[in-house]
Amino acid sequence: MYLNYLCIFAENKNKMTKENLSIEQRPHNSFTRELFFELSVLENHTITISFIPNTESYNNYGLTIGIKVIFEDSELQELILNYSQIPIKRTTGYIKGKALLPQLTDEQIYRLKIYGFNTMDIYEIINV
C-alpha cells in the first residue's frame, strides 16, 4: 500500500536536509516516530533500543529490546505525510513492534505488538 509513496521519497530525499545529529548523539526526547519510519520502512532495518530506567517502557520490556517495527496503514499514511514535508514534521508517540531480543514473556510480546513503547522513554538506539 505505501510502496507508491516511497517514490515520492526517492525524489524528495535529495531535497531534504538530514538532521545534523547522528542517532547516537540525539537527546532521548528527540527520538521520533518519523525516525522509526525512516529506519524501518525506508531503510529496512531492525532496531535495538535502550530505555531510560524507571519509565513505562523500561518497566514493561526491560533495559534493552530488539524489534522489527510494525506500522498500521493509518499510521503509515500519517508518517508518510509527515516525512514528505520539508522540513520533516517530527512527532513523538508509541511505536509497535515484533520482539527479536531478548526473550520476552508472552504478555510482553503481546503488549509490544498491540500497545508498543513510547519514543519519549528511549535513552538510545544502540544499533540498526
Image (cartoon, helix red, strand yellow):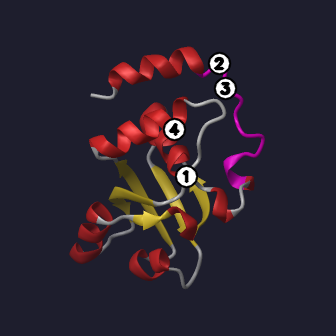
**Residue 50 lies within the magenta run:** no
Residue 126 vs residue 19, the one in the foreground: 19
Choose the circle earlier in sequence order: 4 or 3: 3
Q: Which residues are magenta?
A: 13-24
How far separated are the C-alphas under marks 1 and 3?
17 Å
Secondary structure at numbered mark 2: loop
Q: Is residue 15 above or below residue 44?
A: above
Q: Is residue 101 above or below residue 74?
A: below
Mark nearest the camera among 1 and 2 is 1
Give amino acid for label 2: Asn
Is 77 positioned to the left or the right of 121 in the image?
A: left
Q: Find residue 82 and name its label.
A: 4
Is 60 positioned to the left or the right of 128 in the image?
A: left
Give amino acid for label 4: Asn
How far separated are the C-alphas under marks 1 and 2?
22 Å
Is 40 positioned to the left or the right of 123 in the image?
A: left
Q: Position of residue 121 (x, y in %)?
A: 55, 70
How far separated are the C-alphas under marks 4 and 3?
12 Å
What residue is disc 1 on?
A: 91
**Residue 15 lies within the magenta run:** yes
